[in-house]
Image (cartoon, helix red, strand yellow):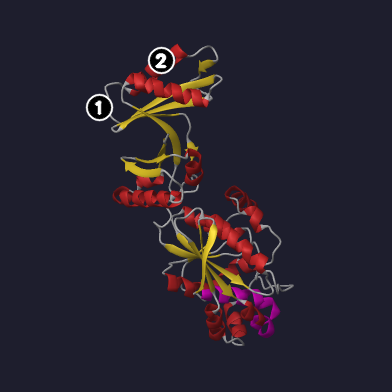
């Protein structure tokens, strides 16, 4: 027997004449999220989306990760006739409070042609329910254990007793594309999550310094990408940039206190080139002001100087505790804290410059053949497509 799930969108309803485009995108993303399950369909009506499915629990798990959904509810559909609505309400109540409890009935009458007003429907349904209940159930208008909701719509009557929060935000893909500089740490996966929540499609760029960073470090990043891929339609593209020779050259030719600054400036140059290749419009990072030496305002200005592309930092004003809370909520924290070093933690200077200058950075870079180093790194870059919970393909850029 198939179940019906009512899906609500919040912010999308405020998009005016563009609303339909956002809703179409949301429906497409829902279909992409469910594509490997059996026996489901997605349809739209005025103000709502609907999923019909043979596996309600599996669909619910997927829908909680689809950005653009405000909330959703498993519903019982009924004819727009009072006795049928009462039967559906009883079914919902028994599923929600089988052994008794407090409840109330609320009605929304979207179909204004229906002959009864919302308060009258609620009263009649509640009265019919109490005719079938004993003293174990009681009415509570203020703090009920469960609210039995009735929606009277043009296409039918729908009854539900549960409202499940959605991921919110905007459907992924409606706000363009960006590249995410993804390390193996706590911050950058959270930045990726926040980019996706605002409808931005992302491709990840990870800087890999084998043999100084091992396969375990790379596998951690693959796992983080999988977590992000579960929240976006299709695959996520991970660009694994071979960064070893660049770091060795910086260490051999640049002042020790400037090594992190020079490294980050070259990372931004590479991320910008990949972004241009892939039609991305911005670079996302997990930086927060003052968190480490490369994240002071002076460092950000000096590092940003090498790119003309917008650099977006959604975590810029957050405390570390705020970031950790989000990481735990989205399931990335336990992966991020695995003790495998990334390229940002090797060759770490004892006293990194916290107020680096652009002119000094440019002076240090004169000792490097930056164009040759970048070209070699891009030629050795590995591209991995990640989606449906497994890495699916590997190739060079």
Judging depth in this view, the residue of 112 and 5 nearest the camera is 5
In the rendering, at what x and y percent does residue 291 appear? 64, 61
Residue segment shown in magenta: 249-270
Picture layout, residue 358 above or below residue 187: below
In the rendered image, is residue 83 in sight? Answer: yes
In the rendered image, is residue 67 in sight? Answer: no
Residue at image position (61%, 80%) is 246
Disc 2 target residue: 128
Q: Residues within 10 Å of mark 2 (few under 14, many from 20)?
A: some
In the rendering, at what x and y percent does residue 62 appear? 49, 46
The image's mark for residue 99 is none
Left or right for 142, reference 151: right
Picture layout, residue 344 above or below residue 313: below
Q: Residues within 10 Å of mark 1 (few under 14, many from 20)?
A: few
Q: Residue 265 magenta-drawn?
A: yes
Picture layout, residue 37 above or below residue 1: below
Say what secondary structure mark 1 lies in: loop
Judging depth in this view, the residue of 366 and 231 nearest the camera is 231
In terms of image quadrants, where is residue 69? top left
In the rendering, at what x and y percent does residue 212 appear? 69, 74
Sequence-wise first label, 2 or 1: 1
**Closer to the observer: label 2 or label 1?**
2
Q: Residue 9 magenta-drawn?
A: no
Furthest-left residue in this view: 113
Picture layout, residue 226 above or below residue 19: below
Q: Assign the magenta stretch its main secondary structure.
A: helix
In the rendering, at what x and y percent does residue 17 appear? 28, 50
Disc 1 target residue: 113
Left or right for 339, reference 294: right
């Amino acid at each position: 027997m198939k179940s019906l799930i009512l899906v609500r969108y919040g912010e999308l309803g405020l998009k005016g004449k563009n609303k339909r485009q956002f809703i179409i995108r949301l429906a497409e993303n829902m279909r992409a999220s469910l594509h490997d399950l059996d026996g489901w369909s997605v349809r739209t009506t005025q103000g709502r989306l609907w999923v019909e499915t043979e596996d309600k629990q599996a669909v619910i798990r997927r829908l909680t990760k689809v950005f653009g959904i405000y909330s959703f509810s498993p519903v019982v559909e009924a004819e727009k006739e009072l006795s049928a609505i009462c039967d559906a309400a009883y079914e919902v109540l028994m599923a929600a409070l089988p052994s008794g409890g407090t409840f109330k009935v609320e009605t929304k009458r979207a179909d204004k042609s229906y002959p009864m007003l919302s308060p009258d429907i609620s009263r009649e349904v509640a009265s019919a329910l109490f005719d079938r209940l004993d003293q174990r159930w009681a009415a509570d208008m203020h703090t009920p254990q469960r609210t039995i909701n009735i929606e009277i719509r043009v296409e039918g009557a729908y009854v539900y007793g549960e409202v499940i929060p959605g991921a919110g935000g905007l459907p992924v893909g409606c706000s363009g594309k960006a590249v995410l500089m993804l390390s193996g740490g706590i911050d950058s996966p959270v930045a990726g999550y926040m980019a996706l929540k605002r409808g931005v499609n992302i491709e990840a760029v990870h800087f890999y310094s084998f043999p100084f960073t091992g396969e375990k470090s790379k596998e951690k990043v693959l796992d983080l990408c999988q977590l992000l891929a579960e929240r976006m339609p299709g695959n996520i593209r991970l660009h694994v940039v071979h960064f070893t020779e660049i770091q060795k050259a910086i260490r051999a030719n640049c002042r020790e206190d400037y090594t992190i600054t020079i490294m980050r400036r070259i990372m931004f140059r590479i991320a910008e080139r990949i972004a241009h290749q892939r039609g991305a419009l911005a670079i996302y990072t997990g930086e927060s002001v003052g968190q480490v030496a490369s994240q002071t305002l002076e460092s950000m200005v000096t590092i940003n100087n090498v790119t003309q592309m917008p650099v977006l930092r959604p975590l810029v004003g957050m405390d570390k505790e705020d970031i950790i809370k989000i990481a735990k909520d989205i399931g990335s924290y336990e992966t991020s804290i695995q003790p495998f070093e990334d390229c940002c933690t090797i060759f770490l200077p004892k006293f990194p410059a916290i107020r680096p200058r652009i002119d000094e950075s440019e002076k240090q870079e004169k000792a490097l053949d930056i164009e040759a180093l970048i070209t070699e790194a891009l030629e050795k870059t590995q591209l991995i497509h990640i989606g449906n919970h497994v890495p699916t393909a590997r190739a060079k850029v």
